[in-house]
Amino acid sequence: MGSEFEPEIDQWLREDGLVITASERAARAVRARYHRARQSEGRKAWAEPNIQDWNSFVRSAWMERSLNGKLILNRTQEQSLWADLALADGRGATLLEEPRYRLADLAQQAHELLCSYAPRLLAATARAGWQNDAGVFSRWLADFEQTCRRSDLVSSARLPIELLDLLKNPSSNLECPPRKPLFIIGFDRLLPVQQEVLDAWGSWREAPLAPAATPPHFHVADDDQAELAACALWSSRRLAATPGARILVIAQNVTAIRGQIERAFLQHAATARAFEFSLGIPLDRVAFSRAAFLLIRWLSSSLTEHELDWLFSTGLAAASPHETRHLQAQMRLLRRRGLEQPDWTLEAFVKSFPARTGEASSLQGGGVEPWIDRMTAARSRLAEFAREPQSPLDWAEWIPELLASVRFAAAVSPASGEFQAEGRWQQALETAASLGYDGLRLDWSGFLSRLARILAKTLFAPESSDAPIQICGPAESAGLTADAVWFLGATEQAWPASGKTHPLLPIEVQRNWRMPHATPQLDWDLAEAMTARLLDSAPEVYFSHARQTEGAEARPSRLVTEVAGAAGPLPADLVSPLAARTAAISVEDFSRVPLPPGRIAGGAALLTAQSQCPFKAFATARLGAQSWEAAQAGLTAKQRGQLLHAVLESVWAGPPDGIRTHAELVDLADLADRESRAAWVAAHVRRVFQKEIRDRLTDRMPTRYLELEQERLISLVTAWLEYESARIAFEVLEIEAECVKDIAGLQLKLRLDRLDRLIDGSVLVIDYKTGDVRTKSWQLPRPDDIQLPLYARFALKEDHQLGGLTFARVRPGDLTFAGHIGAPAGTLFADLKSSSTLLRDPLTVEQLEDWDRYIEQLARDFLAGHAEVNPRDYPKTCERCGLQTLCRVDENRVVLEGEGDEEEGDDG
Ligand code: SF4
């Protein structure tokens, strides 16, 4: 059976027979096949075929026969009812909203299982012996049934049971349409309740499965990527050979690997629009609905910095591209000024713009005032409306008005995908409105949390474009046919698919009633039925699996081996994805754009970047690219480092408040006790905090937290000064000294933390660090850090003789000098142990000359426009860089890793 319409079903529908499919998706597929068949006959018009999915059939049959006027609960209403019952039960786990709704989900599933497999157990007396969690569920179920009876409600899961009763005992007061014979399609396994309903209905039949036209193929690939690439290549060639062919690709766990599948098909499939997924994605991940939800949430609570960045990037939050640019520019400005925050309330964000003053307002506000006015007005309206709890219907009707008032999505020209997403968002609001069926009233946050849950559970798939390649999961493929099928991931672990038994139903009940996953044999039987159905769904069927998956060896599925034989290697023409036509063409770009010699911002970090990766230096210094560190609730590592630098600068600033020499430091160390020394340091720390901690940080960080940070810093600096007091006599020459140096035509402004004159008259260059730094990072041939080697030669005055270069590692529990010093035992510490790295690795003239040459070459390379994407230690260098989206190194990582392997081989 291929994509040709099966004559038996075609005949049935032409004669106005009724076809029932297992799912909506299958109903759509059968309908499409029927229409294609009529078109191929050259017809212009024909009657709509009578095709219904199972749920619609049950619902309409029940409505035709029922006189009791019960309300059918939708899934959201039912879940809400289960959550209320769980809360009323008063158990600890149900007091918090999230666990309560998770339990409500489980209870809803358990109820559906009972309705489908064991309706007899819906009677409370039949569950008398249920213990523990099952006992609790049994109590909730009794309450659920009672509430439904009392309020004339019926769940969708119970509908087939009620219909069964009506079919067996039809009302004499109601005239129902005659029961047409049924043809059922796409049911891998008829549930007991379905079987009973069909039998009670009367005449029904199922299309028998035909044996496969040709024997199925089974292939093994080296890994997941090779397997996906082979499938994509095969699909593309199959389509090229037979235009108009229809291909079904079946994968386990499509949602989880959707991105990988998409990449493989975009790379290898004939056209980007040749394939589509039949499963949607949750609405809370669709741009339109996610942006709408974030915007309304922001009117009453804060959004994270990351959410704000994303919201502004969609362009949906503003009325024009101009406004969007201003909002994005404001985020950049705040970060540049060090005013980033982990969370932003609307009020705080609005306040971050310059204040308006009369007629100059449009200039000062930078063209964003209309946006501010709209958002502020919407916030006030919401505050007014939210004074009283409202019905879900009122909230749902009010939200579109609120969004219109802030001109949400006004700047985006709606492509059809966005129109569809907007329609689905509207449906989600209507579902939320339906929660008011029992007179419920909710405050704003209660309504928002319910809406968030609905968005997370509602799937959105753009309208099918009837692409020739359809991608779906094994269960979703029921009722679909094609000219060829490729089934991915046929491993022993994945097929038959295994699963867990239900935690709220007794295990023996699940076994007795043959519920899903109750025994391995049930999983096997179901997978066997699905496999047989797949073999019947196309004349050509391929199975495949990867030898290695997630780093582990994978065996072929026994079930597939039984029907298709042992897995053989992939055909040679499907093996080499690199030989395939690729969507992206790689171009080696050797062009360089030189920079005229002169001054450029960036300091020593520029040449460090050139050494780490030439593109990093080019992007940061010449393109102004910058990666952002996410804001934190407390001080960031960078802010802590800046505060430490500022305190040590204050300490060594000399009179009146600071000191300048080792002798003064020793006097200080001679102070009566540690507390007195700490009090002296504390005065410096307090002054620095007053000067450096901006008003906004004080606003959002609790006073006690900042006090603790001060205490931490006092203790750290006191310990460091004690450590330094053991040094051989020295004098601080300069602190935070600045100078501009010319390096092979490149002029850089350099800033040194501290220069000390040592006892032998030489000068020691000191750089404070709060991280775990090592001198290994200065090692040639390609240092990771050239800051101190650069200072060695280029930042000292001509009359200075270099005594050494060192990091001062100032970290709690890790106070030390780490560097290269000419004569450390005679100038730094007299009691150095022979194992000390300071003694073992002194500074040498050759070292300095080598660094000189290397640094000058770096400067020349930078000016010449060397901008290769060439990290010194991939991926470590890149992990600390943050420019991956610009240099796209990760997309080329296969090539980079390949080069690395070759080098290793050569060395060996
Ligand atoms: S992410 Fe890596 S390759 Fe890209 S610029 Fe940074 S260091 Fe270079």
Image (tube, rainbow, N blue to C red):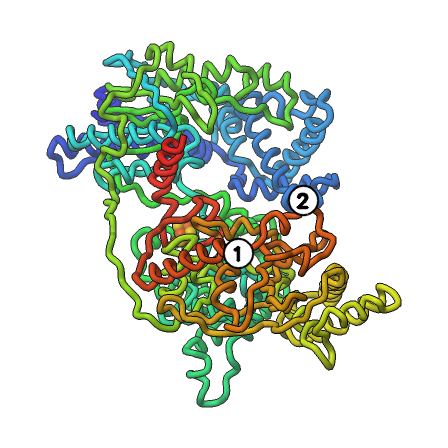
- Rounded to the nearest angstrom, the CA distance separating label 2 from label 1 is 77 Å
Q: Which residue is mark 2?
A: 835
Q: Is residue 530 above or below residue 613?
A: above
Q: Residue furthest left?
A: 42
Q: Position of residue 431 (x, y in %)?
A: 49, 48
Viewer-proximal residue among 663 and 482: 663
Q: Position of residue 847 (x, y in %)?
A: 49, 54
Relative horizontal placement of residue 312, taking residue 736 as reference (left or right)? left
Quadrant holding the N terminus:
top left
Relative horizontal placement of residue 160, taking residue 234 as reference (left or right)? right
Q: Is mark 2 within 8 Å of ligand 1?
A: no
Relative horizontal placement of residue 842, taking residue 417 as reference (left or right)? right
Q: Is residue 707 above or below residue 830?
A: below
Residue at the image point whose x is 71% and y is 45% from the top: 95
Please name the amino acid that badge 1 sits on: Leu
Residue at the image point whose x is 40% and y is 41% from the top: 280
The kind of secondary structure element at disc 2 is loop
Relative horizontal placement of residue 634, taking residue 33 as reference (left or right)? right
Q: Is residue 614 above or below residue 278?
A: below
Viewer-proximal residue among 163 and 754: 754
Residue at the image point whose x is 30% and y is 61% from the top: 864
Neighbour tally class for label 1: few under 14, some 14-19, many 20 plus, Cα within 10 Å:
some
Viewer can see residue 394: no
* Image quadrant assignment for residue 58: top left
Q: Is mark 1 within 8 Å of ligand 1?
A: no
The kind of secondary structure element at disc 1 is helix
Mark sitting on residue 647: none
Please name the amino acid that badge 2 sits on: Ser
Viewer can see residue 259: yes
Q: Of the two numbered discs 2 and 1 on the same chain, state the one appearing first in sequence.
A: 1
Q: Which residue is mark 1?
A: 393
* Image quadrant assignment for residue 760: bottom right
